[in-house]
Image (cartoon, helix red, strand yellow):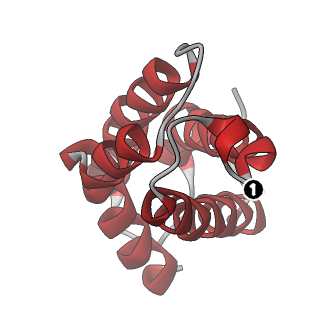
Amino acid sequence: MAPLTTARVRECIDTIEKSYEFLLSYAALGAENEAASKVGSQLRDYLQQTQSALGALAEGVGRVDAGGGNEKFLAIIAADAGRAKAVVGAVLRRPTISSHIIDNLNASAHVRTVLTDLFLLDELL
């Protein structure tokens, strides 16, 4: 696979950050499932966009030009993105997704770790 461009990395970061903000608001609703909320119909779309962005980062961020000497950090991000993608995938496989499940997803160490990685990467780029 070809390296991701800096623009594509930033696009992935923006997608993940916007999704995370949506997920925080969904978690606060206390909905038992997607149908119990006016915004529930958007939930799976945000999760799928997040999973896709995480997948792109997991597969290609290790080859981004983020300045000399950052190869090990990029490898960490790729691994963290892969783990977070797996967690998001587990949630997507649920027949219904409650606010409580999303609250736990948001609190997942894997999700929080990759978010912190991406905030730093965005600054390095």
Residue drawn at x 65%, y 60% as measured from the top left:
9
Residue at (36% x, 77% y) in the render: 120
Residue at the (63%, 40%) spot, across then down? 47
Q: Splitting the image into 4 quarters, where does residue 39 fall?
A: bottom right
**Is residue 90 at least partly visible in the picture?**
yes
* Percent position of residue 2, x then y: 72, 35
Residue type pointed to by label 1: Val
Looking at the rendered image, the quarter that the N terminus falls into is top right
Q: Nearer the viewer, residue 55 or 39?
A: 39
**Callout 1: SS:** loop
Q: In the rendered image, which residue does mark 1 sit on?
A: 39
User: From the viewer's perspective, is 24 left or right of 59?
Assistant: left
Q: Image quarter for residue 121?
A: bottom left
Numbered circles on residues, count: 1
Instruction: Determine whether 5 is above or below 100 in the image.
Output: below
- Residue 49 locus on image (x, y percent): 72, 43
Question: Quadrant where the C terminus lies?
Answer: bottom right
Q: Is residue 25 above or below residue 109?
A: below
From this viewpoint, is residue 69 visible?
Answer: no
Between 87 and 11, the one lying in front of the other is 87
How far from the left and from the top, in percent, is residue 5?
73, 58
